[in-house]
Image (tube, rainbow, N blue to C red):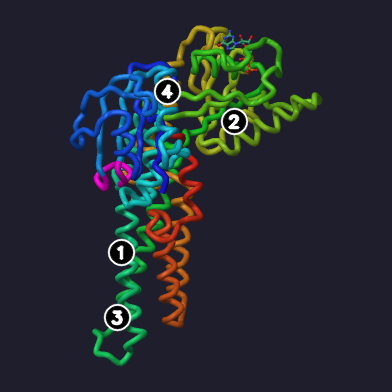
Amino acid sequence: MDTIYAPATAPGRAGIAVIRISGAQASAALKLMALVPPPRQATLSAFVDPDSGEELDRGLVLWFPGPRSFTGEDVAELHGHGGGAVIAALLSALDRLSGCRLAEPGEFTRRAFQNGRMDLTQAEGLADLIAAETEAQRRQAQRQMDGALGRLYEGWRADLIASLAHLEAEIDFPDEDLPGGLLARQRLRLEALAGEISAHLDDGHRGELLREGCHMVILGAPNVGKSSLLNSLARRDAAIVSSHAGTTRDIVEVHLNLGGYPVVLADTAGLRDSSDAVEAEGVRRAQERGAQADLKIVLYDCAETPIPDAEVLALLGDDGILVANKTDRAATPPTQGLPISTKTGAGLGELLGRLGSEAGQKMGDGGSSGLTRARHRQGLEGCRDALLRAFDEKDEELAAEDVRLAARHLGRITGRVDVEDILDVVFSDFCIGK
Ligand code: GDP
């Protein structure tokens, strides 16, 4: 297998940059370019060109002999200065060493998985940790990387395999003196497990929401101040604010961090019947977006209409938030909705607080081990469905086969059974050097 190398730090100028090398040639590379220090001890060294002997840089070198390394292989790290020319020179030197090549995106972590250093959910947790932008996302990714989710699923899988062993004993040795009621006992055990999996699935998608961001959408008639609200909340000019009705024809999104929760806030075209084809398309998209959103913020102009009309209220659905804008121009305070003025900023703090707590309720604080990806959900549903089929099955051998299948579904989530076909999907989330 090739020895791989790549910068582990992001491109651009920085105090230091780390180049990681993994594979059988890692120690040879160190001997030619630096020195092989004692394991896991940072040691100062010159980094030289292996052909000319010219000193390219000077920095710390670290040596992690396998299998006690990130990838499980021999790993070396060069901590050089973080400048474009330094990195280019070091990479070019490594490229000239035989058996060494630049790593593919995610290849270090993929090797770590293949060498049993982590399961697939941990590898995904690592990708999520690197991508985490808010505190709750970090917490959730950290737990997953620590193996909390993998342990839960592996525990369930072990239970299934134990039940399967008992079922098979019953099938293979029906006349043996096995304790009575065995099948019934396995059934109780399996039903309890199916119940646990269903409860785990029935989580309002909180882990997935936290990973991907909660989608909130601002809906309302034209000119009520939707773009102004988005801009005020985002504190930047992400949407066109204009006094002409119908200028926001597409959907404008901003990513916000509301008290640690990732939120994608979208402004939409004003909802009204329009003869203009482009605007009509904008309205169609707004309605579609409203239907898909995790939370709807419905805005009305309380200076124009002191009481929101039925059409506006219909947009709210079950759990939308009604907001009364332009209180600065209203003759009397609005009777319905959260009063705000995007012009004076009145009420915006309260609105942000409300949105943050709604987001928190939908996503949790990342502290419990919930599933975080559609991939997990599919595997768990597959597992539960196979168990439900087993309960209906009259033939014991077929029932055992369903239990075996249920265990396989769990094994695919953690990567304990053959998963070659899903590795490309999992590791495509990574970039080079990870
Ligand atoms: P949209 O069509 O719903 O996106 O509305 P805009 O954000 O483009 O705003 C329409 C008009 O209302 C613009 O002239 C804004 O300056 C004005 N506007 C927005 N919010 C307020 C507010 O709180 N008070 C007042 N007086 N005018 C506002």
The three-letter amino acid code for the residue at tag 2 is Leu
Per the image, the residue denoted by label 2 is: 313
Cβ–Cβ under 8 Å for marks 1 and 4: no
- Residue 380 among those drawn in magenta: no
In 3D space, how far apart are the residues under numbered discs 1 and 4 (Cα atoms)? 50 Å
**Image quadrant, ligand 1:** top right
Helix, strand or loop at label 2? It is helix
- x, y (%) of residue 327? 53, 12
Per the image, the residue denoted by label 3 is: 182
Mark 2, Cα crowd under 10 Å, few <14 / some 14-19 / many 20+, is: some
Quarter-wise, where is residue 178 in the image? bottom left
- x, y (%) of residue 259? 37, 25
**In the image, residue 113 above or below residue 128:** below
Going from N to C along the chain, the mark reached first, 1 or 2, is 1
The three-letter amino acid code for the residue at tag 1 is Ala
Question: In the depicted view, which residue is nearer to us: 59 or 380?
Answer: 59
The three-letter amino acid code for the residue at tag 4 is Ala
Going from N to C along the chain, the mark reached first, 4 or 3, is 4
**Which dot, 3 or 2, sits closer to the camera?**
3
In 3D space, how far apart are the residues under numbered discs 4 and 3 (Cα atoms)? 68 Å
**In the image, residue 193 above or below residue 272:** below
Residues in magenta, as a range:
66-74
